[in-house]
């Protein structure tokens, strides 16, 4: 009985001497590596979102410059008062050059009635005076309107508009071009990291305008998604940042940044499980090492305990 008790004490003590440091070191290493990887992933998600939103902003600024340049054309200015022949020729020539990026380009008068367009006059007579881009242009600011689904192609388009001003700076109408945003969508969705990291973009009302899953475009609103309430509020407030969240039971991280020109927002998201995989590998490796050392310790302590306890019991 004494021998068994001594053996047990020696074995238990030896195992604990080896096991406790391994458990402490292993837990600390896994915890620190998880924290470090999470910090890196969160920071990276915001940088990616800012990078993509910056590219989108620059692309839209170029489109605004193009339309603003057309608004200063003498023939286009004349069209606001009914002299449309020169404007029709100018707009038709412009469409031949940039038509692959636009569905149409047109000129309105000060009430919003379309006077001329670049596709044979099919838009002439339509009034767009209640559209958001017209109101903003009327206030003197070139802008990009809300993304809508094209009735012609079903693809998302955004109208780029610039005011037409008279000699004394008075508002006479606008030049507007329906921009196909396919190239912007591709720019956003081509941003991928690993298997689960991707970017998407919303407009200033939270409606998705770019997403790897095309069926979500103009159909999904982040304000209505459970688990994304806080992120949606920050995106709608044109904030930049990053955070952790859970969506459909999956822990994720997200970084987001606004498109300054439009108030749209780009978000980059990734599953925590993926970016924490290296930390999990470290944890599993430590567990394997711990089990191996434990087995060796048990064998070593067993022989050691027997070597000590036998002489004691004989005496």
Image: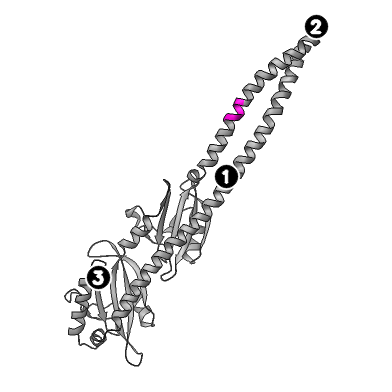
Residue 270 x, y percent position in the rendering: 46, 50
Judging by the rendered image, the residue that carries numbered circle 1 is 34
Q: Are marks 2 and 1 in contact (CB under 8 Å)?
A: no
Which label's residue is closer to the chain start, 2 or 3? 3
Can residue 285 be seen?
yes
Q: Earlier in the sequence, mark 2 or mark 1?
A: 1
The residue closer to the viewer here, 301 or 173, is: 301
> Magenta stretch: residue 291 in it?
yes
Taking the spot 79% from the left edge, 9% from the top edge, the residue there is: 311
The span picked out in magenta is 288-292
Residue 42 % position (x, y): 53, 53
Badge 2 crowding class, 10 Å Cα cut-off, few under 14, some 14 to 19, many 20 or more, is few
Q: Main secondary structure of the magenta part?
A: helix
The residue where tag 2 is placed is 314
Question: Residue 180 at x, y = what percent?
Answer: 29, 65
Locate residue 139 relative to residue 22 in the image: left or right: left
Q: Residue 178 placed where, x, y %?
A: 28, 70
Q: CA distance from mark 3 to mark 1?
A: 50 Å
Identify the residue position indicated by label 3 in the image: 98
């Amino acid at each position: 009985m004494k021998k068994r008790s001594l053996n047990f004490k020696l074995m238990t003590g030896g195992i604990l001497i080896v096991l406790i440091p391994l458990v402490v070191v292993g837990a600390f290493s896994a915890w620190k590596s998880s924290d470090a990887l999470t910090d890196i992933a969160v920071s990276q998600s915001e940088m990616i979102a800012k990078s993509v939103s910056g590219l989108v902003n620059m692309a839209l600024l170029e489109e605004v410059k193009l339309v603003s340049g057309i608004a200063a054309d003498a023939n286009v200015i004349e069209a606001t008062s009914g002299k449309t022949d020169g404007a029709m020729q100018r707009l038709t020539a412009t469409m031949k050059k940039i038509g692959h990026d636009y569905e149409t380009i047109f000129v309105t008068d000060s009430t919003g009635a379309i006077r001329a367009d670049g596709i044979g006059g099919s838009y002439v007579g339509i009034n767009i005076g209640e559209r958001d881009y017209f109101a903003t242009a009327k206030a003197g600011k070139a802008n990009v309107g809300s993304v809508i689904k094209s009735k012609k192609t079903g693809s998302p388009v955004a109208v780029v508009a610039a005011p037409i001003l008279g000699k004394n700076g008075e508002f006479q109408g606008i030049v507007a071009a329906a921009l196909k945003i396919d190239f912007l969508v591709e720019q956003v969705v081509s941003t991928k990291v690993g298997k689960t990291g991707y970017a998407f973009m919303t407009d200033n009302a939270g409606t998705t305008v770019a997403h790897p899953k095309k069926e979500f475009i103009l159909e999904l609103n982040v304000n209505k998604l459970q688990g994304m309430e806080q992120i949606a509020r920050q995106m709608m407030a044109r904030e930049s940042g990053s955070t952790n969240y859970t969506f459909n039971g999956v822990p994720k991280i997200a970084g987001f940044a606004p498109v300054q020109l439009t108030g749209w927002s780009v978000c980059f998201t990734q599953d925590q499980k993926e970016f924490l995989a290296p930390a999990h590998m470290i944890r599993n490796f430590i567990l394997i090492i711990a089990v191996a050392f434990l087995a060796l310790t048990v064998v070593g302590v067993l022989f050691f305990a027997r070597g000590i306890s036998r002489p004691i019991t004989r005496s």
